Image (cartoon, rainbow, N blue to C red):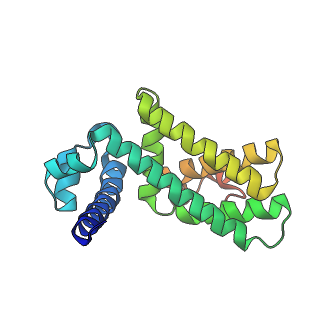
Amino acid sequence: MNTERQRQLSTAEERRETVLRTAIGAFAARGYFGTTTTEVAKAAGISQAYVYRLFPNKESLFVAVVEHCFVRVRAALEGGAAEAKSSAPEAVLASMGDAYARLISDNDLMLVQLHAQAAAVSEPAIRDAVRAGYARTVEYVRGASGGGEQQIQEFFAVGMLCHLLVSIDVGSVDAPWTRTLAAGITHY
């Protein structure tokens, strides 16, 4: 491949990454249905036409954002598994859970996940992306932890509870119901 072609690809790949990072913030703030490609383009400092050169439509942009978020989740879980104090499933799952809790303290990533789950109800391509992301993540967690079916299910249930706790800012409310929901749960 000639140098000019490599430079064009490099620039396109860099722009794609810039658009993805920018789109995460936009979709986190307004969701799939409330965000326009014009807003993403403006925030990324490029034209809407260039967004469409990188992504054929808003749906494909959002799907790419969802996939990008799952890549970040996987990286966090891998880091957590590597930091586990032992190879026992409980230790690996606890360490991965803590790594995930740290990751979703980046509210944008968590909000994109929540918006993706909501949009998956009516948007088949988004549903497929969310399903595929969870399928890969569940199988990674199962393989990395060696946990049984119930342990894996509980791991993901606690993760969903963390989403709820963070999204409703449970830490700012001191009440019996918040203490019940947050008991034993790490969230940042």
Viewer-proximal residue, 7 or 142? 7
Question: In terms of image quadrants, where is residue 24?
Answer: bottom left
Point out residue 95 in the picture as x, y percentages from the top left corner: 72, 66
Residue visible at 26% across and 60% down in the picture: 12
The reply to whether residue 186 is in sight is no
130 relative to 163, above or below: above
Would residue 34 appear left or right of 89 to someone viewing this image?
Answer: left
Residue visible at 51% across and 40% down in the picture: 130
Viewer-proximal residue, 146 or 93? 146
The reply to whether residue 35 is in sight is yes
Viewer-proximal residue, 79 or 106? 79
Point out residue 14 in the picture as x, y percentages from the top left corner: 30, 65
Point out residue 22 in the picture as x, y percentages from the top left corner: 30, 59
User: Which residue sits furthest right?
Assistant: 88
Viewer-proximal residue, 110 or 64? 64
117 relative to 28, above or below: above
Question: In terms of image quadrants, where is residue 5?
Answer: bottom left
Would residue 142 appear left or right of 70 to someone viewing this image?
Answer: right
In which quadrant will I find the N terminus?
bottom left
Query: How many marks on residues?
Result: 0
Residue visible at 26% across and 40% down in the picture: 56
In which quadrant will I find the C terminus?
bottom right
Point out residue 110 in the picture as x, y percentages from the top left corner: 48, 53
Residue visible at 52% across and 56% down in the picture: 71
